Amino acid sequence: MPDELLGLFKTVVWWGFGLGFLFGFFANKTNFCTMGAVSDVVNMGDWGRMRAWLLTIAVAILGTNILAWNGTINLANTIYTGQNLPWLAHVVGGLVFGIGMTLASGCGNKTLVRVGGGNLKAVVVFIYMAYAANVTLRGILAVPRVEWLQAPAVTLTLPTHQTLPHLLHTGLGMSLGSAELVIALIVAGALMAFVFLNKAFWENKDNFIAGLVLGCVVVAGWYITGKLGWAENPETLTEMAVGTNSKLAESMSFIAPAGYTLELWSLWTDKGTVVTWGIATVFGVGMGSFLYAIATKAFRWEHFVSAQDMFRHIIGGVLMGFGGVTAMGCTVGQGITGFSTLSIGAIITFVAIVAGSAATMKYEYWRMMREA
């Protein structure tokens, strides 16, 4: 890396660790859990944590699109907003991830939070999830991902970027900047109305804190990688995000970064592998959760209760690794960060994840009643 960018690279990485730390600390404090949110709705009809998730999305949408509207960041410089829409990958990847996070008792973020809290089951899930992510990125599972689920035959090529503002601004008679702001206000406003107009939501202040803080962390991530860390490479004379694996602007996402983390550990003495923004956020979430657990004396060792329990979690981790990479994100990577760009692919993935998780819970309940 050119010396001119080395200092900026380190700055971006440290910001990634700091924001990941905040994410992990407050996710543990508020019991923020996307799988738990789906479970509460399906099994108890309780929308509290689901509203916290939706509030996080709303805050992220509003902040992200304000940054885009005033020219601070360009959302075209992300993995979520390209013209190619591999809809089948989003659907299948989302469904598989939803099934996996249910079997593994939590999504990628919750796995890291539990690792920080002393959960040994989460350690096993993380290892299998990270390995599956790696082999889906570049290994044997990349074959079905690329040749079947992301093949040109099942990929839509849109006339412009796949965000709602890009697709709708001409029909609305607005400039792109105006559309980014107006559509963000409409979508975020609708989500916030659904959240805030429910009296039960205010019974648990942690849900409000989670939505506000975690949504702001995602916005801050976009600013760090899309503005502070956006620079010209003096060797290639092209602009890029310094410090990210994709060389594009990134924010909170935990499946591919988990794979990069495992790769870093495996190739530690290889000077070509370095701590990046995504890897730093993974470490940050775990450390933030650990600090909260220690500070509140909530840290405790947890382990598998049976071989069947272990097998279930291993399968869940593998499915999350494959599904998260295939869908280009998890419940945070697509369900919040991707959603904040108002990307069609992110919205499809969000719906597919929720559907896959809910269907798995329904099936498990049916099987339990049948056995009883």
Image (cartoon, rainbow, N blue to C red):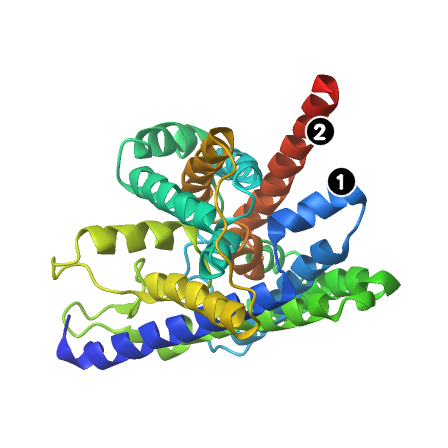
Q: In the image, residue 12 lies at what x, y percent?
A: 33, 75
Q: Is residue 284 above or below residue 322?
A: below
List the residue tagged with mark 2. 365
Which residue sits at x=20%, y=71%? 237
User: Which numbered tag is attached to residue 269?
Assistant: none
* Mark 1: secondary structure: helix
Q: Looking at this view, is 8 or 268 the one in front?
A: 268
Quadrant housing the N terminus = bottom left
Q: Check contact, mark 2 vs mark 1: CB within 8 A.
A: yes
Q: In the image, residue 25 lies at what x, y percent?
A: 53, 70
* Mark 2: secondary structure: helix
Q: Looking at this view, is 236 or 356 the one in front?
A: 356
Q: Is residue 326 above or below residue 274?
A: above
Q: Earlier in the sequence, mark 2 or mark 1?
A: 1
Q: Answer yes or no: is residue 249 visible.
A: no
Q: In the image, residue 271 lies at what x, y percent?
A: 12, 62
User: Which numbered tag is attached to residue 43?
Assistant: 1
Q: Answer yes or no: is residue 350 visible.
A: yes
The disc labelled 2 sits on which kind of residue? Answer: Tyr
Which residue appears farthest toward the top when viewing the image?
370
Q: Residues within 10 Å of mark 2 (few under 14, many from 20)?
A: few
The disc labelled 1 sits on which kind of residue? Answer: Asn
Quadrant housing the C terminus = top right
- Picture quarter containing residue 354? top right
Task: For marks 2 and 1, give the CA distance.
Answer: 9 Å
Which residue sits at x=61%, y=59%? 170
